[in-house]
Amino acid sequence: MRTFTKAWLMLILVSLTGKKLLAQSDPHFSGYYVYPAFLNPALTGIFDGNYRVSGIYRSQWGSVNSPFKTYGVAADATTTKHINYGGSLLTQAAGDGGYKYTSGYGSVSYTGVTFGAVDQHRVVFGLQMGFIQRRFDPAKLHFGDQWNPLTGYSPLNTTVDGFQRTSAIAFDAGAGFLYYDATPGKKYNLFAGFSASHINRPQDQFAVGSDARIPVRYIAHGGIRCYVSDLFTITPNVMYMQQGTAKEKMLGAFGQYTVTEETDVMLGANYRFKDAFAVYAGFNYKSFMLGMSYDVNSSDLGKLTRGANSFEISLSFIGRKTVKTPAGAFVCPRL
């Protein structure tokens, strides 16, 4: 099974042994629209307001070993010049090996491409540039030549494995585009996007003599916002992600119900093929959006995880200098 999660477990082994890097190397999220800076730089500034601040936390594989913990914070802002700006910082601590992944990006999107009778069909282009920094603690790693067939493993046994460095930083870049139908009052509003990260193939070099590079990560995503009534909408959505030999396919939907003029409730679920079911719940109150998701593993690895996979929680705040757009005007979903 070629899922992003299993490939993540192989990443450290591949990087530290200096083999050719073909597997997935980035963190991932079940509620991928909650953290748009990771999904597609073209989503920068695509929201109903003047600025947005978002945070996300994910804990994964805690029942197998030390959990993989991912923290992310992002901010973006709109302008009246068809240019939006944003920035994000993400870090992940992975397992018992002291391995940490940190990335920081600045992003910009151009929103000036529109068509249709009243310019409600919109195409957005985005660019993202920044850095990736990785490090690990070799003192926390176990190597094959530290095992004795009679006495077992001993940290006192020397190892012949050598490392050129235990920390590496590299420049990184990505790009993407997005189309969405912002026609107000329409029965169905389509949105779709595509992004490519690590397009410069930054080096990921730890082992002596290695020329490992981070593979390009491709993401295609889209959905349809379906108007059911003045109080309820449902949005089926799909996402396909590939990095090296690792692939991830997700299919799902979420519903949004308006309780009051200031409060919306959201419920939904996604299925990550051959890996897990992810359920989502959240609500909007005024300018705040709180969301939570939980994964239930459906693969063979579920025997080790006892069905539990990961937990995510996110919080977003949207600042507005003007009144909120009426409910009938569609804005690309943040989920």
Image (spheres, helix red, strand yellow):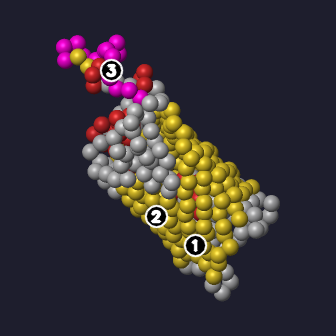
Residue beneath the point at 65% across and 63% down: 109
Q: Residue 284's quadrant in the figure?
A: bottom right
Q: Label 1 is placed on what type of residue?
A: Tyr
Residue beneath the point at 37% across and 45% down: 21
Answer whether labels 2 and 3 touch (C-beta < 8 Å): no
Among all residues in the image, which is located at the extreme bottom? 117
Q: Label 2 is placed on what type of residue?
A: Ala
Q: Is residue 268 left or right of residue 328?
A: left
Residue beneath the point at 39% across and 39% down: 210
> Considering the numbered disc 2 on the image, is that residue within a helix, a strand or a loop?
strand
In depth, the one of 124 and 119 nearer the eye is 124
Query: Which mark is first along the chain, 2 or 1?
Result: 1
Which numbered tag is attached to residue 159? 3
Please tell me whether residue 46 belongs to the stretch shown in magenta: no
Residue beneath the point at 39% across and 36% down: 209
Spot occupied by residue 80 in the image (x, y as percentages of width and height): 77, 67
What whole-number distance in Å separates the C-alpha atoms at marks 3 and 1? 55 Å
Answer whether labels 1 and 2 touch (C-beta < 8 Å): no
What whole-number distance in Å separates the C-alpha atoms at marks 1 and 2? 14 Å
Q: Which residues fall within the magenta stretch?
A: 149-163
Among all residues in the image, which is located at the extreme left? 150
Q: Is residue 128 positioned above or below 110 on the image?
A: above
> Considering the numbered disc 3 on the image, is that residue within a helix, a strand or a loop?
loop
* 1 or 2: mark nearer the eye: 2
In depth, the one of 304 and 100 nearer the eye is 100
Which numbered tag is attached to residue 180? 1
